[in-house]
Image (cartoon, helix red, strand yellow):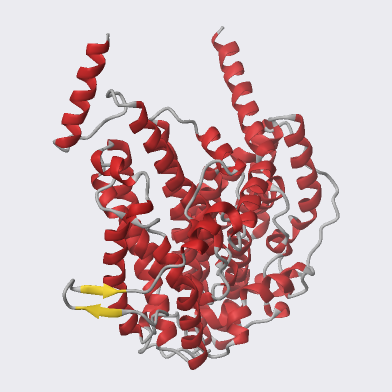
Amino acid sequence: MMHNHENAPHLHEQHFNTPVQDYAPEVKQLVLEYTLQLADTSFILGHRLSEWCGHGPVLEQDMALSNIALDLIGETRSLYQYAAELEGKGRTEDDMAYLRDTVEYKNPLLVEQPNGDFGDTIMRQFIFDSFHFFFLKELQNSTDHRLAAIAEKSLKESSYHIKWSSEWVIRLGDGTEESRKRIEKAIDNLWPFSGELFMMTATEKKLLEHGVIPDYSQIKNSWDAHVAKVFQEATLAVPQNVWMQSGGKEGRHTEHLGFVLTELQYLQRTYPGLEW
Amino acid sequence: MEEVEVNLEAQFEEKVAKDIRIEPKDWMPDAYRKTLIRQISQHAHSEIVGMLPEGNWITRAPSLKRKAILLAKVQDEAGHGLYLYSAAETLGASRDQMIADLHSGKAKYSSIFNYPTLSWADIGAIGWLVDGAAIMNQVPLCRTSYGPYARAMVRVCKEESFHQRQGFEIMMTLCNGAPEQKKMAQEAFNRWWWPTLMMFGPKDEESPNTEQSMRWRIKRFTNDELRQRFVDMMVPQAEFLGLTVPDKDLTWNEAKNGYDYGQIDWDEFWSVVKGNGPCNKQRIQTRVKADQEGAWVREAALAHAEKRAQREQQKVA
């Protein structure tokens, strides 16, 4: 699906127009891989949240879920656009999203987990937001100007997301007996996917050396402190000694992702090369 | 006592005649209140049920931009539902009761949402035709006699015109695209054209509420007047897109400066209104399911708020 930009500028409005920095080829490749990983993460979670639209527990929360989905899809577009520029082969944001297969996607396993009930969705969001917020705060200082600019824009949105999901964890934990059971079950379902957020892949370790990305161990400290504070208010216990699943950031996914991609890539795969 | 009542009614009629808005605390005839609650809640329900056929394509939208636009559009509809439920609440209706009436089948919503969305072109056709018809119906409502309804409609109409543009734009992209895309567009147009004409409601002579609603200035135009305007507006747009209107009787009538169009299948209309459309059951089941599965969430939020309030009180004491 190589789009002709001149004929369809409306399909590809650029979010940022600062030029790509002058990187050595091997560093550029690392930044590209990493940018795709970040884009995949926002995209798959945004997609999952968009599945709620029209089915939320109450109108106001239906709208809140769509809002967060829209923020994440906006962040996704900025990142895929940047990845396409870094790659420099004429691919577009949509080529990145719609024409890469499961093993090429590098999102952590957490974000591809199904919506489950509202408790599962809240816990998945809370685990992610508590990472995303502190991560973006640090990424603003990246030596990569574009990633820093995208982080700055997304941080404003993320500060709303973390507030929303934290408040819901508190409501559900300290709500009714049923809501407590459900949120505890959600913790049980999703905690094993929290650790991967902080495990550094080989790509990430190298980018840390280049000052492109922050040290995740510091973000983990902020994450721990935030989680502890919210769980305490929610009267919930932070799980200890949980076996952590990983592999998503290196393309080894759970079985869910294949179905997500099948659905979202359906039109592009059925009618290759067309403009929509 | 009776004299006071008569005076109030006369004052009300006078205000309406002078186009002075009726506000929630003003006296109004019971029948006016009932008519408005029925109409506004039906309108709110249409927004909420209307999220489903389009929401059906959010996860399959063909580009990131289309996905974001569609999600934002369906979210707008939730927002419209919210404004409208709030407007109905100013008349003494409760949101819970209105929703219960939707779920029990007592309250109606626009029949158009009982048709399925089968291809991506349906998303274009809905935006272009269905939102186009909705705007035709809704713009006059910005001047309706009841203040909160009129103000809600001003906000709704602003967003609807954006929705219609995006629908037309999807259709234009498809019609200028590959042959299979143009075929998709025509096929969707064929399915949505007639149900859209039905959105304006029964023929004037069979619309029992029209006369009173016109007199109260809730409605400003009759169903047939609006339907005619819609046909006259859409035919040239279809021609521009290169689509064929699926009506062999469609002809330009110089004398009336408008199109004559074929016979609407009113049996189909009444059948869908009575619950026999292709998706009536699924739409309501989906709404009921979301409501039931969300019950524990709403209860938890309430319970937590009560606990908080209690703790605050203990702190003060």
Which residue is pictured at 40% across the width and 56% down the height?
A: B202
**Vertical side of A170 occupied by B76: above or below:** below
Which residue ends up furthest to the left in the rendered image?
B18
Q: Quadrant of the N terminus of chain B?
A: top left
Which residue is pictured at 47% across the width and 81% down the height?
A: B185
- Decide which of B166, A226 is in the foreground and name it: B166
| Rendering quarter of residue B164 | bottom left
**Vertical side of A191 occupied by A152: above or below:** below
Q: Specify whether residue A265 is in view.
A: yes
Which residue ends up furthest to the front in the rendered image?
B205
**Vertical side of A172 occupied by B239: above or below:** below
Q: Position of residue B253 (x, y in %)?
A: 22, 77
Q: Position of residue A235 (x, y in %)?
A: 72, 31
Count how many numbered circles sit on residues in the image. 0
| Rendering quarter of residue A250 | bottom right
Please indicate whether residue A207 sits to the left or right of residue A196 in the image: left
Please indicate whether residue B32 sits to the left or right of residue A202 in the image: left
Please indicate whether residue A112 sits to the left or right of residue B159 in the image: right
Which residue is pictured at 57% across the width and 80% down the height?
A: A96
| Rendering quarter of residue B7 | top left
**Vertical side of B199 occupied by A16: above or below:** below
Q: Specify whether residue A71 is in view.
A: no
Q: Position of residue A132 (x, y in %)?
A: 59, 56
Q: Quadrant of the C terminus of chain B?
A: top right
- Decide which of B306, A267 is in the foreground and name it: A267
Which residue is pictured at 50% across the width and 81% down the height?
A: B187
Q: Position of residue B182 (x, y in %)?
A: 46, 87
